Image (tube, rainbow, N blue to C red):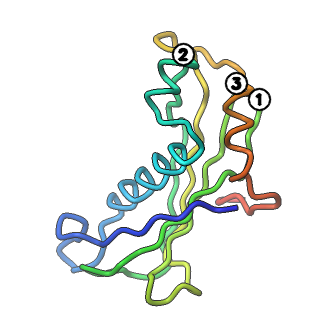
Amino acid sequence: MKYSIEEYVRWEDIDAAGIINYQAYLRFFSLAEVEMFRSCGLAYRQLFEKLGIWLPRVHVECDFFFPVTLDELLVVDAFFGKIGRTSIHLNFEVRKKSDPSTVVATGQYILVTVRQGQFIPVPVPDELRLKLAPFVVAGAVEPGA
């Protein structure tokens, strides 16, 4: 299943051409990521305090297909394409609320589970793997693949 949030394109998200600046997508992705984890009962504070891990990004990518302008309401879907031994592939699809059949952008983060303060990769904890499982989309096409 995919987790969805809705967010408006705000003044600070647009560039001189009047369309969304590529950097703004990272804000949208971050919102979807945090809320999806929270919906799994895994607020980041809990990940840090209970599981003793951090999830740094080791790869970020985004592809843009159609321009988006000020005040458009976007729907951002977040889901996991793969949960590996130490890495988590977090995928995003962005659509305009007014045109849900058209993907305007896609993105991906690759997160690595590391021990806090040491940045040494550790296996994805079983508790994390179990709680994220509902949002793993089998057969998801990985960006750049």
Q: Which of labels 3 and 1 is toward the front?
A: 3
The relative height of residue 26 versus residue 20 in the rendered view (above or below) is: above
Residue hosting label 1:
85
Residue hosting label 2:
52
Residue type at mark 1? Arg
| Location of the C terminus (image quadrant) | bottom right
Residue 136: numbered disc: none
Q: Are marks 3 and 1 in contact (CB under 8 Å)?
A: no
Residue hosting label 3:
125
Within 10 angstroms of label 3, few (less than 14), some, or many (20 or more) residues?
A: some
Residue type at mark 3? Pro
| Location of the N terminus (image quadrant) | bottom right
Residue type at mark 2? Gly
Disc on the earlier residue, 3 or 1: 1
Q: Position of residue 91 (x, y in %)?
A: 61, 56
Within 10 angstroms of label 2, few (less than 14), some, or many (20 or more) residues?
A: some
Q: Are marks 2 and 1 in contact (CB under 8 Å)?
A: no
Q: Label 3, label 2: how many angstroms apart (C-alpha)? A: 10 Å
Location of residue 24 (image quadrant): bottom left
Residue farthest to the right? 139
Q: Label 2, label 1: how many angstroms apart (C-alpha)? A: 17 Å
Which secondary structure lies at badge 2? loop
Q: Which of labels 2 and 1 is toward the front?
A: 2
Disc on the earlier residue, 2 or 1: 2
The relative height of residue 28 versus residue 33 in the rendered view (above or below) is: below
Q: Position of residue 127 (x, y in %)?
A: 70, 28
